C-alpha cells in the first residue's frame, strides 16, 4: 500500500494560470480532506469529500478554488487564475470512515506562484 | 467554534533535557485531541491521541479539561525528536474534521 499519493510534489505557476493538484487516497479509503499550509501558519482545513460528493467546503475560498473526488481517479484541487497569495503547501489526507484519528497524510504539493 | 493554540513557534533544547510542547484548545463539546509530527522531508503522521493514553517514542500527553490543555511531554529529548509538532482537535460527535494548531518546531541540539 503506497499510502496517500500527491502529485506533483512541486508546482510552479505564473499569475493567472491554473493549478491542478492531485491526491490518490490510500486503498480502501473513501474520505479525502484537503488542507493548506501557509508560511507561519498551521494547517487550515479547506474541503472534505467523499466519492462524488463534497461533504464540507467551509474552508474553501469562495472564488477560484474548487475540488472534486470522482468515482474513478484521484481527488483534484483546482485553483484558477492563481495569485501570489496562493503560494503554499497543500496537503491531502484520507481516512477509511471519517474519524479524525484515522487520517493518513500525503507528502503535499508545494505550489509557487511567480 | 473549535480552536487550537500552540503558543510557541519554536522550542530549542539540548539533548537529554525535558521537553514540553504546549497546546491549548477551546471547544464547547467533548473533544478528541491528537498530536501529529512531521520530520524533515517526511509527511505528517499521527504521533498519539489522548483517548489511547499511550506513550509513543517516549512522548506522553494528558488531556486536562480544567485547563483545556493537551501538552506534549518527554522527559529526555533526543536529537531525532527534532521535527514540527502539530496539536489537533476533533469533535467526538458530529464533524470529525480536525482543527490544527500552527505547529511548534522542536530543535534538539547535541
Image (tube, rainbow, N blue to C red):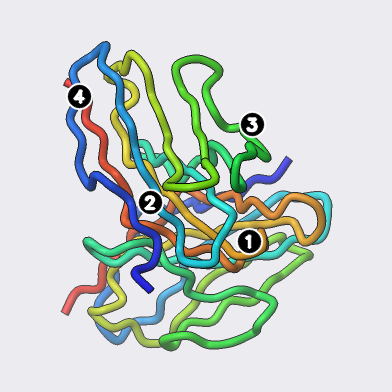
Q: Secondary structure at mark 3?
A: loop
Q: CA distance from mark 2 to mark 4?
A: 29 Å
Question: Which chain is disc 2 placed on?
Answer: B
Residue A94, position in %: x, y?
51, 57
Q: Which residue is mark 4?
A: A13
Label 4 marks which chain's residue? A
Same chain for labels 2 and 3? Say yes or no.
no
In the rendered structure, which disc, 3 or 4, sits on the residue that comes first in sequence? 4
Q: Nearer the viewer, residue A75 or A40?
A: A75
* Residue A100: image tag: 1
Quadrant including the N terminus of chain A: bottom left
- Please determine whether, in this image, residue B25 is positioned above or below residue B60: above
Q: CA distance from mark 3 to mark 1?
A: 17 Å
Residue at the disc numbered 3: A58
Q: Residue at x 50, y 40 (%)?
A: A44
The correct choice, above or below, for B66 with respect to A21 in the image is: below
Q: For marks 1 and 4, give the one nearer the viewer.
A: 4
Foreground: A53 or B72?
Answer: A53
Viewer-proximal residue among B47 and B19: B47
The residue beneath circle 2 is B9
User: Callout 1: few (<14), some (14-19), or many (20+) C-alpha neighbours within 10 Å?
Assistant: many
Parent chain of label 3: A
Helix, strand or loop for disc 2: loop
Callout 1 and callout 4 share a chain? yes
Chain under callout 1: A
**Callout 1 secondary element:** helix
Amino acid at each position: 500500500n503506497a499510502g496517500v499519493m500527491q502529485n506533483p510534489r512541486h508546482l510552479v505557476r505564473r499569475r493567472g494560470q491554473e493549478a491542478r493538484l492531485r491526491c490518490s487516497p490510500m486503498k480502501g479509503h473513501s474520505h479525502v480532506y484537503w488542507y493548506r499550509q501557509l508560511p507561519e501558519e498551521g494547517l487550515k482545513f479547506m474541503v472534505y469529500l467523499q466519492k462524488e460528493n463534497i461533504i464540507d467546503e467551509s474552508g474553501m475560498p469562495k472564488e477560484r478554488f474548487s475540488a472534486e473526488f470522482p468515482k474513478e481517479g484521484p481527488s483534484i484541487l483546482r485553483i484558477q487564475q492563481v495569485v501570489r497569495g496562493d503560494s503554499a503547501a497543500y496537503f491531502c489526507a484520507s481516512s477509511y470512515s471519517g474519524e479524525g484519528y484515522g487520517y493518513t497524510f500525503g507528502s503535499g504539493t508545494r505550489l509557487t506562484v511567480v | 467554534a473549535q480552536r487550537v493554540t500552540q503558543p510557541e513557534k519554536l522550542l530549542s533544547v539540548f539533548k537529554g533535557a525535558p521537553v514540553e510542547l504546549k497546546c491549548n484548545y477551546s471547544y464547547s463539546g467533548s473533544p478528541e485531541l491528537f498530536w501529529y509530527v512531521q520530520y524533515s522531508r517526511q509527511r505528517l503522521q499521527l504521533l498519539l491521541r489522548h483517548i489511547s493514553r499511550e506513550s509513543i517514542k517516549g512522548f506522553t500527553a494528558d488531556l486536562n479539561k480544567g485547563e483545556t490543555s493537551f501538552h506534549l511531554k518527554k522527559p529526555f529529548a533526543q536529537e531525532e525528536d527534532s521535527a514540527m509538532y502539530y496539536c489537533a482537535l476533533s469533535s467526538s460527535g458530529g464533524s470529525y474534521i480536525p482543527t490544527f494548531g500552527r505547529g511548534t518546531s522542536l530543535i534538539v541540539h547535541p
